[in-house]
Amino acid sequence: MEHVSLVAIAVGLLYLGALACIYRILLTYRTSQGAIAWIVGLLGLPYLTVPLFLLIGRYRFGGYIKARRMGDQSLTGLLSRFEQQTTSIPSPGDQRFHDELQVLCKLGRQPFTSGNKCTLLRDGEATFEALFEAMEDATRYILLEFYIVRSDRVGQRIKSILERKLAQGVEVWFLYDDIGSVWLPRRYLRELSDAGARVASFGDGNIRRRRFQINFRNHRKLLVCDGRVGFVGGINLGDEYLGTALQQAPLRDTHCRIEGPAVAGLQLAWLEDWNWASDELPALDWSTGERPAGEEDILILPTGPADSWETCTLFFLNCINNARSRIWIASPYFVPDFQIMNALQLAALRGIDVRILIPETPDSHLVKLAAYSYLVQACQAGIGIYRYQPGFLHQKVILVDDRYAAIGTANLDNRSMRLNFEISAIMTDSRFVAEVEEMLRDDLRNCRLMTESDYRDRSILFRLACRAIRLSAPLL
């Protein structure tokens, strides 16, 4: 009888936990499909679903939000002052364009800044050459934040430069994601720390505040040197972007180099992440706006699960819905939710040139199968799905008409829209936009345009697998 009573108590507590999870879902859910799926699982299989929900079911990065709201007043002041700067939007006589870009400023809580110079880095070789040069030229401090850091040739070159700069008196802050860099040896980090670098993991640094939030990732890839020059894009620190790893071809990816006041936007995003991970606020240079480096207008757009809105989703929707002649999107993953898919279909139906560039062979077979399930919908609406052939296309690039381009870290999938901390740079300079167009046209020449038959002519088992995996899109 005592054993039976203990079992009954345990079952009762389990269902109380399930009810508590359901209560949280009803207060915070973002899609009815996801909410219903969780509720059915919690009621039917609570012993499996309750721990699963605690691990990956959260929609908001609660501890980060609290740190943002209750953190050091100097950080709050920096964010507020930068947000309130006068926005410079190059849209004379075009109120619609002005309003479109003003929305992006409000989403990112940052202004468009003028007086910038942006250089397109079309591949890993150009990117690493520019990264190495900027770090070598640093005289005061270097800020790094990367999702993946490897201890290969590129990683060792980075460490060698940082150790040498530390010996010269340059300060180094090194932030990485503990999930993305799970295979990075502790020795690598220890040697950097012993040389004088401040090293922090986005996850481990605040384990008390971060509990039950392991499904969130810091997917940003950025570098800032002396507050004068910054880098952002899709390239991590690893040999695979040079073709010297085990892959047959280098990852096809893009980064950009920024000089001017927009670097302060990258620096602010880094500082907020560092403050979360380490409870530190380094003294940095915020005077970049006083020294114009060029004539370009740039907006830095950080997005993540600590925002008041689904900022990344709204960013994509704003781009798609306001496109006038074309929208081209390059992303390694094409697993859109119904909002994004509907917006793409509507854009194509109103005559917009919609092209999606994805890899022929991504790093996840499940993602590849899920992408096939959207093919009929896309083709019938007139959306062009292009599969890049030479290697793994990993870049995250958006081209809207000939008006602006975005280069950053956000993929066209649920994780980037709702779970990852991402960051993008949005450029309106006609010269830079033309360079991005030329780059994407070169990529399109190496792509295969998919048709409905790529899906319809496959076996019924293949099509069933694609549709079934699509149901798990929020987890991919």
Image (spheres, helix red, strand yellow):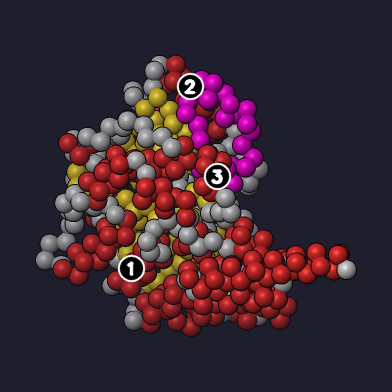
Compute the Cα span from label 2 to label 3: 26 Å
Front residue of 86/51: it is 51
The numbered mark, 2 or 1, whose residue comes first in the sequence reads 2
Q: Are marks 2 and 3 in contact (CB under 8 Å)?
A: no
Which SS class for mark 2? loop
Callout 3, which amino acid?
Arg
Q: Can residue 220 be seen at all in this image of the molecule?
A: yes
Which SS class for mark 1? helix
Callout 2, which amino acid?
Gly
Which residue is disc 2 drawn over?
A: 196
Question: Label 2 neighbourhood size at 10 Å, few (<14), some (14-19), many (20+)?
Answer: some
Magenta residue span:
177-203
Callout 1, which amino acid?
Asn
Q: Quadrant of residue 450?
A: bottom right
In the picture as drawn, the residue positioned furthest to the left comes out as: 93
Question: Label 1 neighbourhood size at 10 Å, few (<14), some (14-19), many (20+)?
Answer: some
Q: Is residue 476 left or right of residue 331?
A: right
Q: Which label is found at residue 91?
A: none
Percent from the top left, x then y, of residue 300? 32, 50
For image coordinates 53% across by 25% down, the residue present is 192
Percent from the top left, x then y, of residue 229? 32, 36
Which residue is disc 3 drawn over?
A: 208
Q: Can residue 395 be seen at all in this image of the molecule?
A: no
Q: Is residue 260 above or below residue 88?
A: above
The numbered mark, 3 or 1, whose residue comes first in the sequence reads 3
